[in-house]
Image: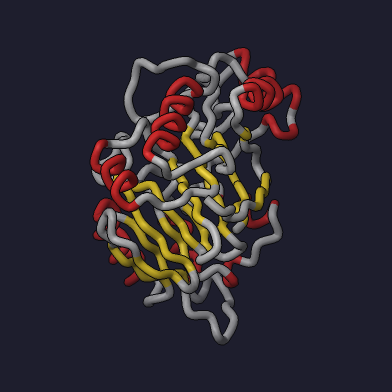
């Protein structure tokens, strides 16, 4: 399996829209991997994770034809992950579509169900929505996808296990340390996770005073518990994602070294990584 991180920032981007803090000044000066857009990823070039307000930029930067992408899972309702306004531009008048185009199929929690029905009407059925219950695996082509409960400032946020039949990925942002019902599910089902992608909005902090996101200190605690319950091992890749400028002033060039010292990979916009199941 492979995952490509199209965008890797928290809601305000990095550097942040209106900010002149030291981290944002440094990111603007350095450019390159220190510039981050709002979080989005794609798995095996065909399963999109989230549809943020930077989707248009992402398809341009990465040479993606959005009519080749038929499925998108949404983590939660916040605009840096779910921007339905741009979904409307699939309708005739805004877009000339391939004759065999079947539309964009979107999946997520009850948070966005009502609004997605309105979007479906506006697009004449070129978008549709499936509300998926937490902890119930479902099929998207050759993927088995399992939504798990997240701990974040939305009504019903999800993180996801994605299984392509060969390896398994846990995509876990936006979330704090998981709620107990998610830990219980993982402990019972024991999926063998080959890559864990974790929220790191708080950057290099050891802990945070707020709930809803993680930082390096919480990432370490999360990894310890995943190893303890036996869903990860020494072969599992651990990746940190979803960064803010509120992370002890650490831009990518600084944080990548800190992350490596603790056994984590740090994402940047456009980063792609492959991973494979190993015998356990």
User: How far across and how far down the image is residue 118, in percent?
Assistant: 30, 65
From this view, report whether residue 88 is shown above or below residue 170: below
Marker count (numbered) = 0
One can see residue 86 in this view: yes
From this view, report whether residue 130 is shown above or below residue 254: below
Residue lying at 46% horizontally and 61% vertically, measured from the top left:
72
| Front in this rendered view, residue 268 or 96 | 268
| Front in this rendered view, residue 117 or 251 | 251
Residue lying at 62% horizontally and 34% vertically, measured from the top left:
265
The color scheme shown is secondary structure
| Front in this rendered view, residue 229 or 20 | 229
Quick check: 67 left or right of 84?
right
Quadrant for the N terminus, please: bottom right
User: How far across and how far down the image is residue 154, in percent?
Assistant: 29, 40
Quick check: 34 left or right of 137?
right
User: How far across and how far down the image is residue 145, in percent?
Assistant: 40, 61
Quick check: 273 left or right of 188?
right
One can see residue 251 in this view: no
Residue lying at 32% horizontally and 44% vertically, measured from the top left:
187
């Amino acid at each position: 399996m492979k995952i490509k991180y199209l965008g890797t920032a928290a809601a305000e981007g990095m550097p942040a829209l209106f900010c002149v803090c030291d981290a944002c000044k440094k990111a603007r000066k350095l450019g390159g991997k220190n510039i981050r857009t709002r979080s989005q990823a794609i798995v095996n070039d065909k399963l999109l994770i989230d549809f943020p307000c930077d989707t248009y930029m992402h398809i341009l930067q990465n040479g993606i034809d959005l009519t080749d992408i038929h499925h998108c899972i949404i983590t939660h309702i916040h605009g840096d992950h779910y921007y339905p306004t741009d979904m409307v531009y699939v309708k005739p008048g805004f877009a000339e579509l391939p004759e065999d185009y079947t539309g964009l199929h979107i999946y997520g929690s009850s948070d966005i169900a009502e609004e997605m029905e309105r979007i479906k009407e506006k697009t004449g059925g070129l978008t549709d929505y499936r509300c998926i219950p937490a902890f119930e695996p479902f099929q998207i082509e050759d993927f088995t996808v399992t939504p798990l409960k997240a701990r974040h400032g939305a009504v019903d946020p999800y993180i996801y296990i994605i299984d392509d039949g060969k390896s398994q990925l846990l995509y876990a942002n936006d979330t704090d340390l998981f709620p107990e019902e998610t830990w219980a599910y993982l402990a019972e089902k024991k999926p063998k996770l080959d890559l864990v992608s974790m929220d790191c909005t708080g950057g290099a902090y050891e802990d945070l005073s707020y709930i809803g996101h993680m930082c390096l200190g919480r990432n370490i605690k999360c990894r310890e518990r995943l190893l303890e319950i036996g869903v990860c091992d020494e072969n599992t890749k651990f990746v940190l994602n979803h960064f803010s400028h509120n992370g002890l002033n650490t831009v990518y060039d600084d944080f990548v070294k800190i992350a490596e010292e603790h056994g984590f990979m740090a994402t940047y916009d456009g980063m792609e990584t492959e991973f494979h199941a190993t015998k356990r």
